[in-house]
Image (cartoon, coloured by chain):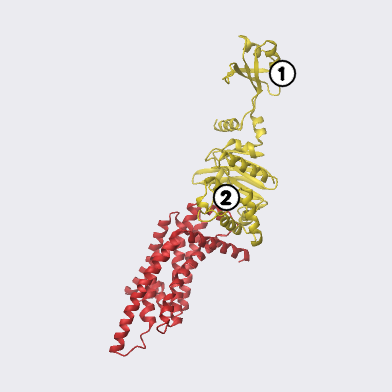
Chain colours: A red, B yellow
């Protein structure tokens, strides 16, 4: 894309972030998110320290227990669950508001392509989400002061959360393109994310050997788990990026359809 | 500059606009006049590329709106019915954003923002959040937004709605000042607005063009006779009969008096014959107390009602 095209995307994303920083929603979401994550963190660390003391006493087998398994796996899985609440709140207004305030007429009569509009919106949401994740970075830093943090695995876990969150953000953006009502967009996002989880649960209980591997591949939890274990599996990267791309493609199609005019 | 040809937009079975066509010359200010729901906004949305047409073509500066939408959008400044503002942003933040998505270079941006802040009278509120501004100011922010990239073509959908009388005059002057260097289409359902700002008028009703002409041309076209209003304070009993007897007089009808104590008539004469002198001589020589004698021209309102009534008949 030409340089001018990128500038327009940056302008759109910057505007979106600016608008978000004015509304109280972002601060409330960030505050609640960090508070819940912090609570989980303190709980999990307390339990982990008790566990390791017990393990040491009975088995003397500390080496296979580490912070990754005892702390970061549960904390990252918890963050993943909280995303169900956080993501809809981050994405619900992205396109609904443009339609409700009729500002979409400005965007669509400016020399912008729909791809630029979708990209700008998505990147803004991704940047805000990445910022929220980065704020939880105090956890490994704090633990590094007392124990050996396996940084590559922790970073792989964060990458997994970013990619999986990226999928949810694309779903949220799609939902936001479907209605001018923010609340509806948020609830649809929540439902769609839950739908993805249901696929994962179905994968666990599936009996037949033909369906099971397919469901397992589609299950976002399976892919996240690989990242949490520090496995940078190209299949998982491709999976998350392609679902994200598909969500953005559908958003583009919705914007292109008559629905908006 | 703008060519609209056989433009039709259907929403299901209903045609919002039906085979509309008109041209706008470079530098011209064209008024788009019609009642609410006539299809003004739909037409403007198609010209700006916001809404696709069902059939027909639109070209702006030689570019087809449907073939080269980006080229057209680069050349158009558009003020929609409702100013497309973000209440969360300040006026200057907003204008910088619009400048950037319109493709203004970084260097030109600050100058452009300062220019429209000044021309739209927004310099005092540049740091205020748009959400906290009055409707009049928001409307002006909307206008500033349309002007930020100094586009050759401006499409303004009811630009003076929500403004107070002083602001309306200011905005009209601003728009008049845009003519020449810019080609402007302006929609309104307020008739004096067209007289005040536009060189030519397109009258649209129920999705069809009723007339395209200059304001004066329209009035002349609809005039089927010369009309003169006459008021006498001491009219004799035979006054009506005498006046009827004057050459070229076609009809004479009583008019409601304006409170000056006399009686008023509307005298119609054959087209192309000015009978004012004859009427005056007749009235003065008979001492009827002539206090008023003036030609009656059709106001745009009359023109509009007449045209739409003809359409319905």
Q: Mark 2 lies on which chain?
A: B
Query: Do tags 1 and 2 sit on the same chain?
Result: yes
Residue corresponding to mark 1: B277
Q: Residue B192 at x, y = what percent?
A: 60, 35
Q: Which chain carries label 1?
A: B
Q: Residue at x 61, y 30 (%)?
A: B299
Task: Look at the numbered disc 1 and give the secondary structure of its residue.
Answer: helix
Point out the residue furthest to the bottom here. A60
Is residue B144 visible in the rendered image? The answer is yes
Residue A195 relative to residue B166: left or right: left
Task: Look at the numbered disc 2 and give the secondary structure of its residue.
Answer: helix
Q: Residue at x 37, y 84 (%)?
A: A66
Crowding near pointer 2: few (<14 within 10 Å), some, many (20+)? many
Residue A55 versus residue B21 in the image, above or below: below
Q: Quadrant of the C terminus of chain B?
A: top right
Crowding near pointer 1: few (<14 within 10 Å), some, many (20+)? few
In the foreground, B193 or A166: B193
Q: Residue A252 at x, y = what percent?
A: 51, 61
Is residue A102 visible in the rendered image? The answer is no
Q: Residue at x 44, y 78 (%)?
A: A141
Foreground label between 1 and 2? 2
Residue A228 versus residue B226 in the image, above or below: below
Labelled disc at residue A243: none
Q: Residue A177 at x, y = what percent?
A: 47, 58
How many marks are shown on the rendered structure?
2
Residue corresponding to mark 2: B141
């Amino acid at each position: 894309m030409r340089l001018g095209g990128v500038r327009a995307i940056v302008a759109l994303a910057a505007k979106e972030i600016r608008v978000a920083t004015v509304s109280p929603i972002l601060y409330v979401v960030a505050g609640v998110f960090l508070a819940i994550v912090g609570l989980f963190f303190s709980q999990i660390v307390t339990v982990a320290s008790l566990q390791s003391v017990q393990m040491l006493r009975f088995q003397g087998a500390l080496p296979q227990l580490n912070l990754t398994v005892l702390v970061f796996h549960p904390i990252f899985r918890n963050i993943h669950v909280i995303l169900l609440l956080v993501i809809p709140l981050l994405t619900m207004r992205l396109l609904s508001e443009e339609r409700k305030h009729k500002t979409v007429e400005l965007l669509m009569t400016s020399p912008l392509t729909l791809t630029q509009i979708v990209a700008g919106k998505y990147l803004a949401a991704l940047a805000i989400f990445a910022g929220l994740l980065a704020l939880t970075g105090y956890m490994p830093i704090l633990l590094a002061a007392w124990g050996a943090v396996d940084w590559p695995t922790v970073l792989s876990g964060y990458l997994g959360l970013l990619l999986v969150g990226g999928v949810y953000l694309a779903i949220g953006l799609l939902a936001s393109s479907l209605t001018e009502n923010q609340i509806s967009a948020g609830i649809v996002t929540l439902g769609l994310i839950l739908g993805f989880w249901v696929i994962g649960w179905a994968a666990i209980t599936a009996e037949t050997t033909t369906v099971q591997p397919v469901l397992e591949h589609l299950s976002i939890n399976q892919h996240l788990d690989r990242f949490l274990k520090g496995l940078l599996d190209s299949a998982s990267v491709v999976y998350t990026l392609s679902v994200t791309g598909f969500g953005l493609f559908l958003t583009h199609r919705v914007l292109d359809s008559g629905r908006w005019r | 500059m703008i060519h609209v040809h056989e433009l039709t937009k259907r929403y299901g079975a209903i045609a919002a606009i039906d085979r509309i066509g008109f041209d706008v010359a470079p530098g011209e200010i064209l008024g788009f006049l019609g009642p609410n729901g006539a299809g003004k906004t739909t037409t403007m949305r198609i010209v700006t590329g916001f809404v696709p047409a069902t059939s027909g073509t639109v070209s702006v500066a030689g570019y087809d709106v449907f073939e080269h939408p980006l080229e057209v959008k680069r050349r158009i400044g558009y003020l929609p019915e409702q100013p497309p503002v973000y209440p969360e942003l300040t006026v200057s933040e907003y204008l910088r954003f619009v400048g950037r998505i319109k493709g203004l270079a970084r260097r030109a941006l600050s100058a452009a923002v300062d220019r429209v802040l000044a021309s739209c009278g927004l310099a005092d509120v540049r740091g205020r959040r748009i959400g906290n501004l009055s409707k009049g100011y928001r409307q002006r922010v909307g206008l500033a937004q349309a002007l930020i990239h100094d586009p050759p073509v401006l499409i303004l959908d009811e630009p003076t709605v929500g403004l107070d009388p002083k602001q309306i005059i200011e905005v009209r002057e601003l728009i008049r000042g845009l003519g020449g260097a810019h080609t402007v289409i302006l929609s309104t359902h307020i008739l004096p607005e067209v007289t005040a700002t536009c060189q030519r008028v397109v009258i649209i009703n129920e999705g069809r063009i009723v007339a395209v002409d200059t304001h004066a041309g329209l009035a002349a076209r609809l005039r089927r006779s010369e009309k003169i209003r006459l008021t006498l304070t001491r009219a004799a009993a035979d006054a009506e009969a005498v006046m009827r007897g004057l050459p070229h007089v076609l009809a004479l009808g009583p008019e409601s008096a304006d409170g000056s104590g006399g009686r008023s008539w509307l005298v119609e004469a054959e087209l192309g014959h000015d009978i004012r002198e004859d009427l005056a001589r007749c009235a003065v020589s008979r001492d009827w107390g002539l206090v008023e004698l003036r030609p009656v021209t059709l106001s745009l309102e009359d023109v509009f009602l007449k045209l739409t009534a003809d359409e319905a008949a």
